[in-house]
Image (cartoon, rainbow, N blue to C red):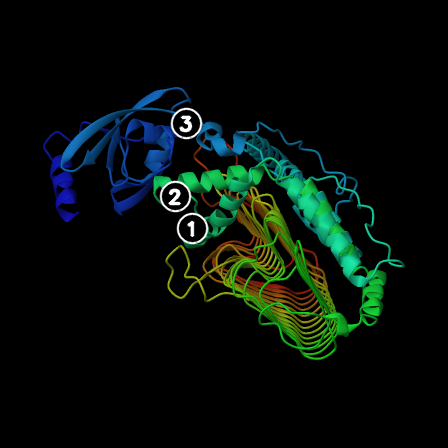
């Protein structure tokens, strides 16, 4: 490698050679051309190709990983900014020449220029267009105080024209991408960005207002742009025994699950099951789907194509058949009828199962077990378990072969260990635990998680511990992952993609109604930015897409009451990424938030991130950059704290700051507050996008508490209007 760089250096230093190419002008017009390559700096003055996107124009032209980029005549290319501005100066359909250095030789390749919609073709195969109006479940909601304050400040500071230019640029930019799986809620906010806080609040209020699992499923379906109705109850609670009641619900759910996969073959369904872990492993390692070889990338593309064929309406109807069993009256009926069963009729048990049982029979869908009040051990996989009490152990060491599985445990300090606990992977999984201090410890894809399915975990009472690796605790791709804990002081810990994570066409929800809770997603996976002692998070209210392959979903972490602690790494605590929307909403309590970069109401790449705090004396702390109301690249970061004596600590591009045509807003209502950061506090002057949007950044910090607040940059009881659109107001 050193020899190649030396030869290239000698080549470029040849007399007269440096005059052959000119520097890239700063005023090149943008015509939105793209090639499909990703560069990396190899010195302060040179670039090499780090990645070539499969089937892109760069790939067709023969550009290879490792090629050193010398020029796009007549311009010398020295850095990624030069490269991007030069390529974008060409219109789709044009042809450019690229001079490269490879294996001791200088090459000049001819390359066609494309546009984003064709480069990211997987996002446009269905050719669907999303409306920009508010969905019915959001339409008619009134602008909250923080939104109206922002609109008033923009008008008072004569920034309306700049804000209008930014909105137009975003609308144009959103239209450049395909929208096959883009959610209408996200699309609406991208076209009217100051509604981000209103939309986040409407989502959290709708979830808070409905206390049932059935209701939570309906909300998830609404936000996934689905229209479903409650299915008819398939059992008679007066006539049916518990086994018949359970089996009827299982069969109805199985029938709907089969219907959901009707557009793919049994072979493809098996391929999907095997491919899901590999796709998520790649995404967890690099946060990209195409960083492996071409064979691997083709496999991931095929996985997404299969997943897009799954009928989510049918899956939700199947899940509702099971969720009806978690209704209060149904649970009472099941418990009463279970106590009337005759244990003398039990002939056998599944291998490894131990304890006292009131019923045990195999069915075409798997075993149905009813455990007595004593401690029981459940191993392997069953279709349904009803357990009346005792400190039980549920042990699953491998993925479930069945599509449908439910557990209802009435009381006891239980341990759920290993495997796909409460997971819907190509199917539906439901776990309902009504009482006890429980331990939930799973691996990847566990604890209210879904991929082409519905995963539900509902815990009503107790001080519980939830622990899993990657993808869990209310996380979903192509479906819904729900974790609801109704009371107790709980502990949540995961490695990555967790705690209210909405991936591609997914709705992920972690809803904790009460208790002093701890949420941890940090110190497991090193930061992809390479920063020492910094870790990845991607958790605690995240909406995340596969960049270049599919739009993100909606992720919500909603905490009701209690003094809570949130600790996350990069991308945590109300963050959106690539057409996703992430929300963290905390209703009451004195809370502490700690994150790294892109945290606490932040977003990047056409996305929405919001943190809504209703009350309490709260402490916010982040390190590095892009936090506490920060937007990067046509994205909205929104933090609204409505009351309390709060403290905000950050470093850069924080506290109402934006870059690359982003919008960042921090609003604080009543209270005596303290703000500390090195750059931010209503900052719109950071880097603007060179890709032809011709629009500013918008950063706003608004404090309307009327108390004596302290700032590291701004002054109390003052207004300011800085470069870009940097707006500050303390009143």
Secondary element at image label 3: loop
Q: Nearer the viewer, mark 3 or mark 2?
A: 2
Residue 74 position in % (x across, y down): 26, 25
**Image location of residue 517, percent across then percent down:** 64, 71
Q: Quadrant of residue 369?
A: bottom right
Q: Position of residue 403 (x, y in %)?
A: 62, 52
**Residue matched to label 1:** 282
Q: Nearer the viewer, mark 2 or mark 1?
A: 2
Element at badge 2?
Answer: helix
Tell me where residue 585 appears, x and y as whole percent: 67, 58
Q: Quadrant of residue 191?
A: top right
Q: Nearer the viewer, residue 228 or 207?
A: 228
SS at badge 1: helix
What is the crowding at mark 1: few (fewer than 14 residues within 10 Å), some, or many (at least 20)? some
The answer to whether any part of residue 720 appears in the image is: no
Look at the numbered discs 2 and 1 and tell me whether their residues touch, using CB distance below 8 Å: yes
Q: Real-space Cα distance between discs 3 and 1?
A: 28 Å
Q: Which residue is mark 2?
A: 296
Q: Residue at x 47, y 47 (%)?
A: 275
Q: Quadrant of the C terminus?
A: bottom right
Q: Residue furthest left?
A: 15
Can you tell which mark lies on residue 33? 3
Q: Residue at x 9, y 32 (%)?
A: 15
Earlier in the chain: of badge 3 and badge 2, it is 3
Distance (Cα) linking label 3 and label 2: 27 Å
Q: In the shown orientation, is residue 97 left or right of residue 423?
A: left
Of 141 and 458, which appears nearest the observer?
A: 458
Whether residue 383 can be seen here: yes
Q: Answer few, some or many: residues within 10 Å of disc 2's Cα (few below 14, many 20 plus, some between 14 and 19).
A: some
Q: Nearer the viewer, residue 589 or 507?
A: 507
Q: Earlier in the sequence, mark 3 or mark 1?
A: 3
User: Seen in the image, is 279 located left or right of residue 259?
Assistant: left
């Amino acid at each position: 490698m050193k020899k190649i760089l030396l030869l290239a250096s000698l080549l470029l230093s040849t007399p007269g050679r440096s005059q052959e190419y000119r520097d890239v002008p700063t005023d090149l017009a943008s015509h939105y051309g793209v090639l499909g390559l990703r560069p990396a700096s190899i010195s302060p003055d040179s670039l090499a190709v780090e990645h070539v996107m499969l089937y892109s124009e760069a790939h067709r032209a023969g550009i290879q990983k490792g090629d050193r980029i010398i020029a796009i005549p007549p311009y010398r290319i020295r850095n990624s900014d030069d490269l991007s501005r030069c390529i974008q100066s060409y219109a789709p359909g044009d042809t450019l020449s690229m001079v490269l250095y490879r294996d001791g030789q200088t090459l000049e390749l001819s390359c066609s220029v494309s546009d984003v919609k064709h480069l990211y073709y997987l996002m446009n195969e269905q050719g669907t267009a999303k409306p920009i109006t508010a969905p019915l479940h959001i339409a008619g909601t009134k602008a909250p105080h923080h939104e109206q304050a922002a609109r008033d400040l923009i008008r008072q500071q004569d920034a309306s024209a700049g804000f209008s230019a930014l909105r137009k640029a975003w609308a144009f930019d959103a239209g450049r991408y395909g929208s096959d799986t883009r959610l209408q809620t996200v699309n609406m906010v991208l076209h009217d960005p100051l509604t981000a806080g209103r939309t986040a609040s409407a989502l959290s209020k709708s979830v808070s207002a409905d206390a049932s699992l059935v209701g939570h499923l309906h909300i998830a379906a609404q936000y996934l742009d689905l229209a479903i109705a409650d299915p008819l109850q398939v059992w008679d609670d007066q006539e049916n025994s518990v086994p018949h009641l359970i089996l009827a619900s299982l069969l109805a759910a199985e029938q709907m699950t089969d219907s959901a996969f009707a557009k793919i073959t049994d072979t493809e369904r098996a391929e999907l099951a095997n491919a899901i872990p590999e796709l998520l492993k790649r995404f967890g390692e690099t946060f990209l789907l195409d960083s492996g070889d071409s064979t691997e990338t083709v496999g991931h593309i095929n996985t997404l194509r299969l997943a897009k064929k799954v009928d989510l309406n049918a899956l939700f109807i199947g899940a509702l058949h099971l969720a009806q069993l978690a209704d209060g009256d149904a649970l009472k009926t099941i418990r009463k009828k279970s106590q009337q069963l005759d244990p003398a009729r039990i002939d056998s048990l599944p291998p490894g199962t131990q304890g006292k049982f009131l019923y045990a029979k195999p069915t075409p869908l798997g075993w149905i077990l009813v455990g007595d009040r004593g401690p029981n051990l459940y191993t392997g996989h069953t279709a349904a378990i009803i357990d009346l009490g005792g400190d039980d152990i549920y042990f699953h060491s491998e993925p479930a072969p069945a599509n449908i599985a439910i557990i209802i445990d009435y009381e006891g300090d239980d341990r759920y260990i290993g495997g796909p606990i409460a997971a819907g992977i190509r199917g539906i999984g439901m776990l309902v635990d009504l009482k006890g201090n429980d331990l939930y410890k799973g691996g990847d894809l566990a604890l209210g998680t879904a991929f082409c399915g519905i995963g539900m975990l509902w815990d009503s009472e107790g001080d519980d511990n939830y622990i899993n690796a990657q993808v869990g605790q209310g996380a979903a791709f192509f479906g819904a992952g729900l974790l609801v804990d109704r009371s107790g002081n709980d502990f949540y810990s995961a490695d990555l993609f967790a705690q209210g994570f909405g991936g591609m066409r997914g709705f992920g929800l972690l809803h904790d109604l009460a208790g002093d809770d701890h949420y941890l997603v940090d110190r497991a996976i090193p930061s992809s930015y390479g920063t020492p002692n910094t870790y990845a998070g991607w958790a605690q209210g995240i909406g995340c897409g596969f960049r270049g392959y599919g739009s993100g979903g909606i992720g919500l972490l909603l905490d009701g009451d209690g003094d809570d602690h949130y600790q996350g790494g990069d991308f945590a605590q109300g963050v959106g990424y690539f057409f996703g929307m992430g929300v963290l909403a905390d209703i009451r309590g004195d809370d502490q938030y700690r994150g790294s970069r892109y945290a606490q109401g932040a977003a990047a790449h056409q996305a929405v991130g919001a943190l809504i705090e209703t009350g309490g004396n709260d402490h916010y702390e982040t390190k590095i950059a892009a936090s506490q109301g920060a937007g990067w690249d046509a994205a909205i970061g929104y933090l609204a704290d409505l009351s309390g004596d709060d403290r905000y600590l950050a470093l850069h591009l924080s506290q109402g700051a934006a870059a690359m045509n982003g919008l960042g807003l921090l609003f604080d209502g009543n209270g005596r507050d303290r703000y500390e950061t090195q750059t931010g506090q209503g900052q719109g002057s950071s880097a603007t996008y060179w890709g032809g949007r011709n629009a500013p950044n918008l950063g706003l910090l608004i404090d309307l508490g009327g108390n004596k607040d302290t700032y590291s940059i701004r002054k109390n009881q003052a207004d300011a209007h800085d470069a870009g659109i940097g707006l500050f107001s303390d009143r």
